Image: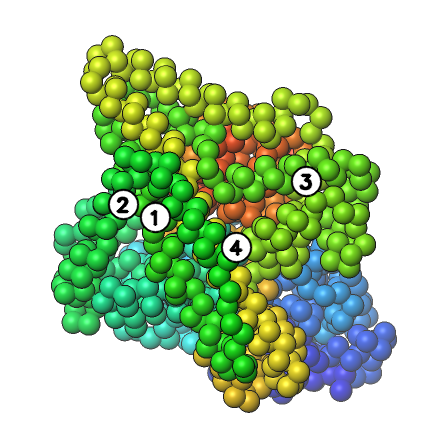
Amino acid sequence: MDVIDLADITPVTTELVGGKAAGLAALIAAGERVPAGFCLTTGAYRSGAVPERAVLAAYERLGGGPVAVRSSATAEDSPGASSAGQQDTVLDVRGRNALLAAIRQCWASLDSERAVAYRAGQGQETGDEAMAVVVQRMIVPTAAGVMFTANPLTGTRTETVVDAVPGLGTGVVDGTMDTDHYVLPGRGPLPWRRDHGCLSPDQLHELRATARRVQRALGSPQDIEFAYDAEGTLWLLQSRAITTLFPLPPGTDPVQDDAVQDDPRVYLEVGHMQGLRRPVTPMGVSVLRATTRRWLHLFGVDDAVVDTVLVDIGGRLFLDITGVVRSPRLRSGVPAMAQVYGPAVARGLRRVLEDPRYGPRPPRRGQRVFSPGATARLLLAVVPASLLGALRALARPAAARERAFRGLEQVRRQRWAAPADTASRIRSAAHLQDATMTGPMLRSLPPLWAALLAQGVAERLLHGILRPGELNATLRGMPHNVTTQMDLQLWSVAGSARAHRDLLLGTAPDELAARFLRGELPEFGLTAFLEEYGLRGSAEVDVGSPRWADDPTPVLAALSGYLQVTDPGQAPPARFARAADEAEAALVDLVGRARRTRPLRARLAGALLRRSRELAGLRELPKFLWLTPLAQVRGQLLTAGAELTERGLLEQAEDIMFLTLDEALDAAHGTDSRSLVTRRRREHDREVRRRQVPGLLLSDGTNPQALPDDTAAEHGPDVLVGQPAATGVATGPARIVQHPSEARLRPGDILVAPTTDPGWTPLFLTLGGLITETGSTIAHGPTVAREYGIPAVICVPDATTRLVEGQTVTIDGASGVIRLHPTEPVTGHGAGR
C-alpha cells in the first residue's frame, strides 16, 4: 500500500504512515476538522522511488490546486520525541511536478544534519527510520499559530498557551515573527474583555474548548497547529504529544478529572538528597517503600501512609507536603525548612504559601500521618535515647566513634542464609535491611546529631561575629569520614597504577572496566579496593543501580584524573591536610575575635566546634553501614532474576529491577513479565534523558520554580547564583558531567553536575570546585567537598545547560555566586517544525 487517505488510517497502520499522519488521523477519528488529504506511506520511501501514478491520482481526487506537503517520519511526533522542525514541510505546492519534487525534498530531509543530530540526542537508534509524506489541501488562513494544551514553560496542565500571527502560521513555528501570545486559564473568564491581537475573544474561547477536547481524546497534553480561514472556520493542521513536560503525580490529571482542581497538592523532590537525580528503578522505589513502611510501623505509624506521602513521579522520589503547607500550626515554618533545599525551592514554596488554594485547612479524616498516640510513642521511643546518645557522644567523642565503627564491622561480618526458592528469595530480600536499620544504623546516628547540635549552638553563640561561610570553613579536613578514607585509598591505588599510566590514560574507562572484569588488566590494587568498596556507586540507594563491583568504569575514570596530578602540593593527601590546617586556623581566628567582646561565649563556642570536628566526620557512616545489607538485597534479587530468566519469564536477570517486589513475586509464581519490563525500560530510558527535574511540583503539573523570577536580573547575565556549600574561591574550566562514568577531568577543573553522592566523590580529589543543580549543605557531596577544601555552590538551576563545556568560571563558595568569563559564541542553526 503506497497511498492511503488520512481518514482511513488506523492505529495499526502507524508504522506505515509515521507520527504526523497518525496524529492527523487521530484528530479525524475524534471528530475534529482537518483538511482533507492523503499519505504516501513508508513503503514507497523504502522502495526508493515515488509511485507517481498513485500519488497524482490521489492529488486529482483532492481536486488539484495548492497543497501542503509535510514530512511524517516513523520517529516523528512520538510520545518520547516530537522531532519538531527536524524534517521538511513545503507549503502552497501547485502542480504535479512541484508535488513530486516536494515529496522528494521531504524524503531527503530525513537524513539532514539536524535530523540525524536530533535523533542521536534523543537516544534513538539509527538505521530503521523511514519517511511517509502527508499531502493536504492548503488552507489560506487569516490567522494561524500553535496552541499547547498545557503550559510548556511552567508545566501547568490547566492552562492553554496560544501563539498566533495574521496569515500563515510559519512565522510562529520558525520564530521569524513577533506573535500574539495568550495564556488561557483552564476555566472561567478570559483575562481580556475585548479583541486582543489577531484572535477574537470568541476564537480564544473556541481554541480553549478545542484544546481540552483534543487532549481528552488523545490522552495526553498536545502541541496543536491551527488556522482560521476567511470564513472564520477553525482547522487543525497537526497534533502531537508535548514531550518535554514532567509527568504528573499519579491520579492527579486535572483535565481528565475536574475534581482534581478542587483538591490541589504540593510535592517536594527529596531523592536528590541521596544523589538520585536520574530516575529510580521500579524495584528501587519498591524496596525503599518497603523499608520505610517497616521503619515507621515500629513507631506506630500506619505503613499505608508511605504510599500516599512518598510518591514516585517519573521515577523520582517526592514527598507530598500538602498537609504541612496547609497546617495552621506548621505552615509558618515551611520557608525556614525549605532553605536546606536551596533558594529556588524556598522561593517556590513562598509562592505556594501565597496561593489561596493552599491556605490553612485542618486535615480531613484519614489524612493524618501521625495519630496522637503514634506521635507520643514516636517521641518516647526516639527522643530520650537520641538525646542521651548525643550527650554521651559530646562527652566522650572517641568512645562514640569506636562504638559506631564497631557497629559497621558487626554488619560487614554478618552472613545471610540463601533462601531455597525464587519466591522465598524475593520475600527475604524485602527484609534483609530490617535488623541493620533498626539496630546498628540507628545507634550510629547520635554522634552525628551531637555534631549538628554542637554546630548549631556554636552558631548561636557567635551570632553577629560570624562572617558568611566562616562556620563552614571550620569544617574542612574533617577526620573519621569513611567516604574520605575511601577516596584517599583510591589515591593509593593510583600510586601503584603509575607503572601502567600510558595504558590507563590512553584507553577509555569503559574499555578498561571491561578488561578488568575479564581479568585482562594488570593488577595494581584495584581488586582489593573493590572488595572493600565495590558495593558503592552512583545513586547507590537504588538497588537497581549498578555498583562499582558490577561496573568499575567510574572508578577507572577517577583514576585517570589522579594520574594527571604532577604537583605534589595538589596531591589529595596534601590537599586534605592543608584543608585541616585551614580549618584550625579559621577556628582560632574566629574564637580569637569573639573573645574580645564575649570571652565566655567564645570559649564555649570553640569547645563545641572542636567537639563537632571530632564527630561530624561520622556523617557518612550510617549510609555506608546501610549499603552492606542493600548490596545483599541487590544480590538476592539478581539471583532471583536469573532464575526467572531461565524459566522464560524475563529476558535477563537485570530485568527484575523493572518490577516491584509484588510483581517479582507474581513472576516467581509464573507470570510472564517480559512485556511489562519492556514498557518500563522504555519509560525509564526516556526519563534518564531528562535533564531538568523540578524540586517542587504541584498536582496540576506546575513547577513553581519555573514561574517568572523578578530577582533573576539583579545579578546580570554573567552571574549565576546558588546556595553556598563549601567556602573558598576557585577559577577554572567548567566540565559538565551527567554521570561519574563519563568524567574526563583534569586537576583544577570545575565539576558541573546535576547532583552528587558518595559515588561521585573520588572525582573530588583533583577538582578546583564543584557546582550542582540540586543538593543540600548537609548532603553527602557538599560535606565531602568541605572536607577537601573544595569551593562548592549547589542548587544552581539548569547549571548543566546554562554553562558551556570548557567555559572559564569563578565560583565563590561563601556567597554562592558564580561569575562567567567571556567565552567563544556557540553557533548553530534552527529549523521550522
The quadrant of the picture occupied by the N terminus is: bottom right
Q: Are marks 2 and 4 in contact (CB under 8 Å)?
A: no
Foreground mark, 3 or 4? Answer: 3
Residue 641 locus on image (x, y percent): 59, 76
Along the line of sight, which residue is nearer the eye, 561 or 725?
Answer: 561
Specify the label residue 493 is tagged with. Answer: 3
Separation of marks 2 and 1 at Cα, in angstroms = 9 Å
User: Mark 3 belongs to which amino acid?
Assistant: Val
Q: Secondary structure at mark 3?
A: helix
Residue annotated with mark 2: 389
Q: Which mark is residue 445?
A: 1
Q: Estimate the spatial distance between the alpha carbons at disc 3 and disc 4, rounded to whole Å.
A: 24 Å
Q: Is residue 745 above or below residue 50?
A: above
Is residue 816 among what the camera can see?
no
* Mark with earlier residue (2, 1): 2
Please report whichever mark, 3 or 2, sits nearer to the chain's N-terminal start. 2
Does the residue at mark 2 contact the one at mark 1 (Cβ under 8 Å)?
Answer: yes
Q: Position of residue 366 (x, y in %)?
A: 19, 72
| Nearest to viewer (mark 3 / mark 2) | 2
Residue 766 lies, with reference to residue 698, above or below; the image says above
In which quadrant will I find the C terminus? Answer: bottom right
Q: Residue at x 31, y 43 (%)?
A: 449
Among the two numbered marks 4 and 1 on one chain, the one whose residue lies closer to the N terminus: 1
Q: Nearer the viewer, mark 2 or mark 1?
A: 2
Instruction: Give whichever of discs 3 and 4 has the lower sequence position.
Output: 3
Disc 1 on helix, strand or loop? Answer: helix
Q: Is residue 435 left or right of residue 298?
A: right
